[in-house]
Image (cartoon, helix red, strand yellow):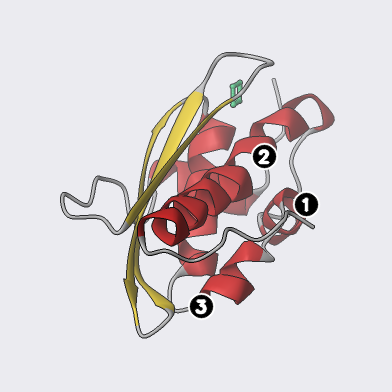
Amino acid sequence: MVAYSEKVMEHFMHPRNVGEIADADGVGSVGNPVCGDMMTFYIKVADGRLADVKFKTFGCGAAIAVSSMVSEMAKGKTLDEARQITNRMVADELGGLPANKMHCSNLGADALRAAIEDYERKHGGEPKEEA
Ligand code: FES
């Protein structure tokens, strides 16, 4: 039995911002090479900020909790601030993940960044190099 933090369980049972944004400004999908799970983020941008963030995750409980947390952390942030969210920050914010589930935290921030890059491509901005 894997020991999840209470926060992970809570986000898994009640994930925030699940779904799709039909007229999204940016969409980013990432697959986890370790297990084949998939995560897609949808963003709406207004005044340089993430006005709305939604996700669809086909993955384990940890991946769903990670997506939910990323969506909460990203909402309202500027594109630059959101780009600075790292997988490690998300795992920390969730109160940690069991060692054999750390790979599940790899998708969240990456998928969000992919959505931001998609937005910038569509709107003529140069995608920034990843830190
Ligand atoms: Fe695939 Fe967790 S087992 S993301």
Q: From the Cβ of disc 3, is ligand 1 less than 8 Å away?
A: no
Residue at the location (72% across, 33% down)? 3
Q: Give whichever of 23, 54 is nearer the camera.
A: 23
Q: Are marks 2 and 1 in contact (CB under 8 Å)?
A: yes
> Which of the 4 quarters of the picture holds residue 45?
bottom left
Give the x, y percent position of residue 18. Answer: 31, 47
Which residue was labeled with disc 1?
88
Determine which of the numbered discs, if any, sits on residue 77 in the image: 3
Specify which label sits upstream in the sequence, 3 or 2.
3
Residue at the location (55% across, 35% down)? 63
> Which of the 4 quarters of the picture holds residue 66?
top right
| Secondary element at tag 1 | helix
Q: Residue furthest right?
A: 99
| Secondary element at tag 3 | loop
Q: Residue furthest left?
A: 22
Q: Residues within 10 Å of mark 1 (few under 14, many from 20)?
A: some
Residue at the location (68% across, 37% down)? 106
Left/right placement of residue 103 relative to residue 113 reads: right
Which residue was labeled with disc 2?
105
